[in-house]
Image (cartoon, rainbow, N blue to C red):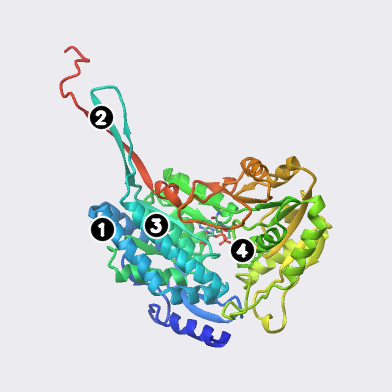
Amino acid sequence: MQTTAESSARAEEILRKLPRIEGVIPMYVNGRWTLAKDGDTRELINPSDGRPIAVVADGGAADAEAAIAGARRAFDDGPWGRISAADRAALLFRVADAIDANRDEFMRIDTLNNGKPLRETEYDAIDAANCFRYYAGLATKPHGQTFDVPAPSQTFTVREPIGVCGQIVPWNYPLLMATWKLAPALAAGNVCVLKPAELTPLSTIRLAMIFEELEFPPGVVNVVMGAGATAGHAIAASVLVDKIAFTGGTTTGRSIMQAATANLKKISLELGGKSPNVVFADADFDTAVDYALFGIFANAGQVCSAGSRLIVERSLHDRLVERVVERARKIRVGDGFDPETEMGPIISPVHRERVEGYIESGLTDGAKLLCGGERLGGELAEGNFIAPTVFDRTSPKMRIVQEEIFGPVLVVQTFDDEAESIALANDTIYGLAGAVFTQDIAKAHRVVRKMRAGITWINTYHPTYNEAPWGGYKQSGIGRELGTYGYDAYTEVKQINVNLDVEPSGWFSG
Ligand code: NAD
């Protein structure tokens, strides 16, 4: 087994294979590698040790506009529109195979750039390949319907691509979020202008190399790097973009929705969450404890669907919370390249301070801190590490209960009966996910049916399937990704009517 240093050195060696122009990792626009028009660059930092790892092009509005213009030409006049669904599928299967063949590179790039442990980035890389494979399969499946309308007509629908799709993604699953956007859009015949998060663009650049190697026509896939307020806003506002698909924070989602009104573009939003994990006293104890930990501390809590509120039946509260805290203290936090590491760092110093601000507010509001709450020092001092944190004795109006922290902070709430568990579960502006743990299957069904959330789990937390829809109720989003829903979201529906009795209607007499 490699040591942490060897493993990290291997990642840096992989980075050296990425394209460079004058030492800078460029964007992929209209089939060419290019620097930002104004020459701006951004230094990327390893969140585990604060060291610089690469310098990338930092695009702005002009770069986004160039990519959009290229995508527009590719959609309106390029060969992509003449490629059959079967050939598009074949290309996407090859993308999946190429991700698999280079899995080690994708894993290590994301661990270096995002900090999450290798076992998580391995899972992401496997899932990304499978997502391309799933949508490659879906490209050739039937998507239209026929309708029994009054004779003599025959009416049916076809699904057609929407056109130029702007896609903006966050930093918490760099490769996977890019894949969730690109795979269904391309399968349905669209062209894409994708903007990765400015902190974590590297695995998306590695992915763009695959599109280049497989000779996707120029302009079909564009990767624009840059800040949200400039490059991202230009994509959301452009009248040449037909659809915007965004994953990120709810506040950003709101401003993207406003920008998208310029040409009333189609919109999909996958936003934040404050998801409830409801545990009844009759739950299988060890399973409930295990998933309570996994729900919040996987990816250091930087997961939109994190089980950040543990809602426990009062009679089980003391025993469950004691065990959760005991195990939370034992979580091995560290560099993602260390094979022992179970939880990595927070993405950036700025975000760490945001999480610490929430911890501070929990203390000020009178919640009881049971473990964590502090930065980790020693050999982790240069990275953005926060210890797994659990707050108890919370009340529903506290900020730590209502707002998305997006870090390794679990808040415990307590209920006395089923009705109260549901009321607490639904008591935030969010509605992304939720789970219930009980051995009473009827109760489990009753509770999840009453949760105002788009993704629910019974006796598990977090499983996500390419085959099943993903998205939120309330302020957690608009629309669904993944599954057939995710494919449909990248299509327009066209009704086609055929008159089977071709003769004049005689409506006007003259
Ligand atoms: P963020 O909203 O700050 O940024 C996300 C992306 O939007 C980045 O690429 C950023 O550059 C871009 N952006 C920022 N401002 C913009 C603007 N004005 N116009 C256009 N683009 C803009 O979010 P983040 O901090 O990167 O990610 C964390 C958030 O993402 C959390 O709230 C989390 O819940 C959410 N998220 C949701 C899902 C989901 O599926 N629902 C998945 C992952 C993350």
Residue 499: image x %, image y %? 21, 27
What distance separates the C-alpha of mark 3 from that of mark 2?
Answer: 32 Å
Residue on which the image places disc 2: 154
Please, what secondary structure does the residue beneath circle 3 have?
helix
Quadrant of the drawing holding the C terminus: top left
What distance separates the C-alpha of mark 2 from that of mark 1?
Answer: 29 Å
* In front of the other: 197 or 373: 373
Q: Earlier in the sequence, mark 4 or mark 3?
A: 3
Which amino acid type is marked by label 1?
Asp
Residue 373 is at least partly visible in this image: no
Residue 202: image x %, image y %? 46, 72
Q: Nearer the viewer, mark 3 or mark 2?
A: 3
Residue on which the image places disc 1: 87
Residue 212, placed above or below residue 79: below
What distance separates the C-alpha of mark 1 from that of mark 3?
Answer: 15 Å
Residue on which the image places disc 4: 302
What distance separates the C-alpha of mark 1 from that of mark 4?
Answer: 37 Å
Does any atom of ligand 1 lie closer than 8 Å to the CB of label 4?
A: yes
Where is residue 218, by image quadrant?
Answer: bottom left
Residue at the spot 38% in from the left edge and 54% down from the top edge: 185
Residue on which the image places disc 3: 134
Residue at the spot 80% in from the left edge and 55% down from the top edge: 317
Q: Earlier in the sequence, mark 1 or mark 3?
A: 1
Q: Nearer the viewer, mark 4 or mark 3?
A: 3
